[in-house]
Image: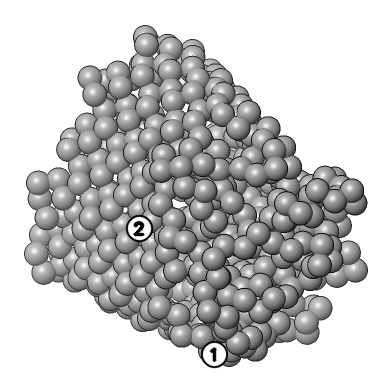
């Protein structure tokens, strides 16, 4: 099944003695190591593009893709070292909205559904295309669980999302504006049942709510005959929680390419971020500016990209004004048709904001320290290709060095909330990744991904909250253009967290999470769906003391018009 990631945040601090936890079976106690309270982490996603490519940006996609466009594509992405895949956060998993390509082309729909855990789904989409060059779209989605995996409504949650988009297509450019609002309400339910039974327990003190408003406008080239290809986007995002935390983030991104000859291209990417975070008495003014000029040479045999990535970061509160330059080199060789061997090196300063950290772990406590992660270098090599018969593959080995690598662990003063811990020294991360995909025309698609991580930390005792092995197997099948099935299986292992109050380290049990979504088209405009999530019924803990929902289901009906 296909799931959408949910944002997350922090709350009010309470005495650790009140929050004695129901702990999983501990491993041998580990001596408490030095935890540096500086910060940093998060790896930025990068794509290795299969050459040759004469243009840098994707144009407006056709409303009805051709069979060639629907063909299974493959690309390699550096896995972001997140605390958890959003697909297996302790939520009712969102039902997939994908449907067979050959289904009737109704652009508008409403969807209603319900399930166990007192779950409710309401979703709708409306598009207006009365003018040839102008399109307006609006969508609304609400998914909630009245009760959760433990302590009834005290572990319930709800997520609401509103989107409005306007697009204007001229002969030479496309203009788009987006306005969005997200409301995420949940509770810090990682407390002990003994504490909940005390008369001093107040459910209002465990509530949290994140409200996010974002606006973005952008323009990009749509004329393939233009000598210069470009894209310019700018937007502002405002995040607030139920208490004193807020963050305003203004980001601008520019990309351009210029064809110098038939084989040589000049590329430039530039980013500017101006951010202010407030949390009680803490006010951070944090900026980051990046410019990345590169040159690309392409031929039928190989592609070479080389340049420099110059980044400046400032933090008024911490007195930081740091400018660094990193080499960018990528070589992609195609010794055989549809087979590529690649290698390269790059580096960057990766932004850590309150919003990005909450996207990884919504159980954050108040006044977390924010700092950016310096990726000093990342040396990588691998291969990918199409081997025929519907099979494609990817494989990659990466060795990266970080300054101030960040992890998540339960706070010492309140173990129901998480702190961000940073390794102030040098951290080395080895990543071995692989992917195998199979596609049978438009009927069946299957993708198996695996990732192995080895962490060499300097000052932190362990990479708290991060798995050392993950695997994802995703499948979709269309039967007779009426029955559409998606099935996913996730496996995570090697996650550790520590209770610093008791000085005990816990190795969380391996996570197995299987999900199935079935859509059945009853007619041209009506379809029914059912989602079965966490089929194994494993009440696993992705985060220490936070038990996930067991077997949960969601069923309903959709009407297109």
Q: Is residue 313 left or right of residue 335?
A: right
Q: Which mark is residue 172?
A: none
Q: Nearer the viewer, residue 561 or 520?
A: 520
Q: Position of residue 173 (x, y in %)?
A: 49, 43
The residue at the point 42 percent across, 16 percent down is 527
Q: Position of residue 344 (x, y in %)?
A: 32, 78
Residue at numbered disc 2: 471
The residue at the point 26 percent across, 32 percent down is 477
Q: Is residue 223 left or right of residue 26?
A: left
Q: Is residue 21 visible?
A: yes
Q: Which mark is residue 458?
A: 1
Relative to 376, say whether 446 is above or below: above
Mark 1, Cα crowd under 10 Å, few <14 / some 14-19 / many 20+, is some
The residue furthest top is 523
Q: Position of residue 246 (x, y in %)?
A: 80, 57
| Residue 112 location, quadrant | top right
Query: In the rendered picture of this protein, how many numbered marks are placed on residues?
Result: 2
Q: Nearer the viewer, residue 361 or 426?
A: 361
Task: Tell me how far mark 2 sits from mark 1, CA to CA.
Answer: 27 Å
Mark 2, secondary structure of its residue: strand
The residue at the point 63 percent across, 70 percent down is 409
Q: Nearer the viewer, residue 75 or 499?
A: 499
Relative to 277, say whether 186 is above or below: above
Mark 1, secondary structure of its residue: loop
Q: Where is the N terminus found, in terms of image quarters?
A: top left
| Residue 181 location, quadrant | top right
Which mark sits nearer the N-terminus, 2 or 1?
Answer: 1
């Amino acid at each position: 099944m296909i799931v959408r990631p949910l944002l997350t945040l922090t709350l009010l601090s309470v005495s650790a003695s009140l929050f004695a936890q129901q702990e999983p079976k501990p491993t041998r106690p580990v001596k408490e190591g030095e935890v540096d309270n500086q910060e940093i982490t998060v790896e930025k996603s990068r794509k290795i593009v299969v050459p040759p490519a004469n243009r840098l940006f994707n144009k407006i996609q056709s409303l009805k893709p051709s069979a060639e466009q629907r063909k299974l594509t493959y690309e390699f992405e550096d896995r972001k070292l997140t605390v958890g895949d959003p697909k297996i956060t302790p939520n009712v998993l969102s039902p997939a909205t994908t449907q067979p390509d050959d289904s009737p082309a109704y652009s508008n729909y409403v969807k209603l559904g319900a399930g166990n855990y007192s779950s409710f789904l309401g979703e709708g989409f409306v598009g207006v295309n009365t003018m040839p060059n102008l399109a307006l779209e609006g969508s609304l989605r609400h998914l909630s669980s009245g009760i959760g995996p433990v302590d009834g409504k005290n572990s319930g949650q709800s997520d609401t999302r509103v989107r409005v988009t306007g697009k204007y297509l001229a002969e030479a450019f496309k203009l788009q504006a987006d306005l969005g609002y997200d409301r995420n309400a949940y509770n810090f339910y990682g407390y002990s049942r003994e504490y909940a039974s005390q008369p001093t327990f107040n459910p209002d003190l465990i509530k949290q709510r994140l409200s996010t408003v974002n606006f973005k406008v952008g323009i990009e080239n749509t004329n393939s005959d233009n000598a210069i290809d470009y894209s310019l986007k700018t937007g502002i995002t405002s995040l607030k929680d139920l208490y004193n935390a807020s963050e305003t983030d203004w980001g601008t991104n520019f990309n351009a390419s210029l064809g110098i000859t038939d084989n040589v291209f000049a590329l430039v990417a530039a980013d500017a971020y101006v951010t202010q975070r407030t949390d009680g008495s803490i006010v951070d003014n944090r900026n980051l500016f990046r410019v990345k000029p590169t040159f690309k040479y392409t031929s039928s045999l190989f592609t070479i990209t080389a340049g420099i990535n110059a980044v400046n970061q400032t933090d008024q509160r911490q007195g930081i004004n740091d400018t660094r330059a990193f080499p960018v080199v990528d070589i992609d060789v195609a010794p055989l048709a549809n087979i590529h061997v690649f290698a390269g090196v790059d580096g960057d300063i990766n932004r850590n904001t309150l919003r990005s950290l909450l996207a990884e772990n919504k159980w954050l406590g108040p006044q977390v320290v924010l700092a950016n992660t310096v990726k000093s270098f990342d040396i990588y090599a691998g291969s990918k290709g199409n081997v025929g018969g519907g099979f494609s593959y990817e494989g990659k080995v990466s060795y990266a060095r970080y300054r101030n690598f960040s992890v998540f662990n339960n706070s010492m003063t309140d173990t129901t909330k998480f702190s961000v811990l940073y390794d102030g020294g040098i951290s080395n991360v080895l990543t071995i990744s692989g992917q195998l995909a199979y596609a049978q025309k438009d009927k069946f698609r299957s993708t198996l991904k695996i990732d192995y991580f080895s962490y060499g930390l300097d000052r932190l005792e362990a990479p708290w909250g991060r798995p050392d092995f993950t695997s994802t197997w995703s499948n979709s099948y269309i039967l007779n253009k009426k029955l559409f099935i998606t099935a996913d299986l996730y496996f995570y292992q090697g996650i550790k967290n520590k209770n610093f109050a008791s000085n005990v380290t816990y190795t969380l049990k391996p996570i197995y999470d299987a999900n199935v979504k079935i859509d059945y088209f009853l007619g041209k405009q009506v379809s029914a769906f059912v989602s079965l999530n966490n089929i194994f019924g494993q009440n696993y803990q992705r985060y220490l003391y936070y038990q996930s929902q067991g077997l949960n289901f969601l069923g309903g009906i959709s009407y297109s018009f």
